[in-house]
Amino acid sequence: MLSTGLPQGAVPRLERPGPLRERVYEALLELITTRALQPGQHLVESELAGHLGVSRQPVREALQRLNTEGWVDLRPAQGAFVHEPTEEEADQLLSVRTLLEAEAARLAAANAGKTGIAELEALCAKGERAVADGDVDLVVATNAEFHAKVMTLAGNVVLGELAGQVDRRVRWYYQPVARQRGKQSWIEHRELIEAISARDEARATAVMRAHTEHTRETYHHRNEEAS
């Protein structure tokens, strides 16, 4: 195992040709948001390049971009490290998420048809199975799919674009609490589907607001217990 904490063969080598710089960036960002690379972890250019099957240059460029976007910290004379989010950062991000998601739920209740509701139900069933199987990675991915579908059903392009900007950070914060939220999260998703299906905009808004606040509270409580 390398000091980056990734076992040999865990990361697929990037195939050429293609926009290599962008693909290296996306690969590293995915490893960070899924917490395969943990907050505070030292990122060694040569080792990451070896994992990805590329030279150090695109890795260096990707790390610089990730630093600009707040995913990586570049420390003089020490190197690159995965950013460790503060409680304030998490609170601000998850509070903004609540505002966006609550409005999306209201619009989805106003606009969603039978097909869209059926898609939400299918995703909910998928998430429930993942919880039952203890597959945290699939739980996180399906949770993101579910919320993205609600956003799509809202039908507001600008709202969707804003939500897209915070989606990966939401996944980053949700990953460590997914197991704790477990079944309850999907019970809340079922309640949301019922409100959307009934075209009850006020209830859909309230359910989504409470749902996202529960995640925010769980994240903070988890950190308090760990400290």
Image (cartoon, rainbow, N blue to C red):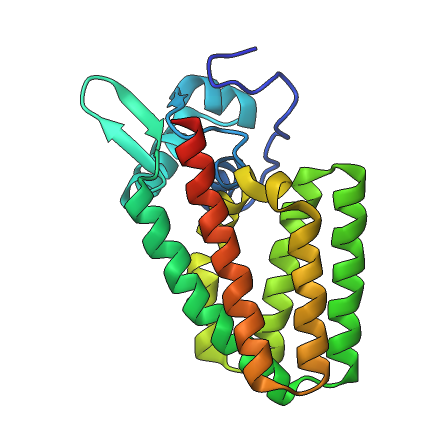
Dividing the picture into quarters, in which one does residue 118 lie?
bottom right
Q: Is residue 41 left or right of residue 191?
A: left
Could you say which quadrant of the image residue 151 lies in? bottom right
Residue 19 showing in the rendered view: no
Q: In the figure, 162 relative to 26: above or below?
A: below
Residue located 52% across and 18% down the image = 5
Which residue is pictured at 53% across the width and 46% down the height?
A: 174
Mark yes or no: residue 213 visible. Answer: yes
- Relative depth, front residue between 13 and 197: 197
Quarter of the picture holding the N terminus: top right
How many marks overall?
0
Q: Position of residue 78 (x, y in %)?
A: 24, 18
Residue 4: x percent and y percent? 47, 19
Nearer-the-camera pick, 60 or 176: 176
Question: Does residue 106 appear left or right of residue 121 in this picture?
Answer: left
Q: Quadrant of the C terminus?
A: top left
Q: Nearer the viewer, residue 103 or 185?
A: 185
Is residue 161 depicted above or below 13 in this figure? below
Relative to 64, say whether 42 is above or below: above
Could you say which is closer to the camera, residue 190 or residue 130? 190
Q: Residue at x 47, y 24 (%)?
A: 49
Residue drawn at x 52%, y 48% as measured from the top left: 171
Q: Is residue 196 above or below residue 219?
A: below
As drawn, which residue projects farthest toward the left?
76
> Which corner quadrant of the image does residue 71 belong to?
top left
Instruction: Give residue 224's position: percent from left, percent from top.
Output: 40, 34
- What is the x, y in percent for residue 46? 42, 18
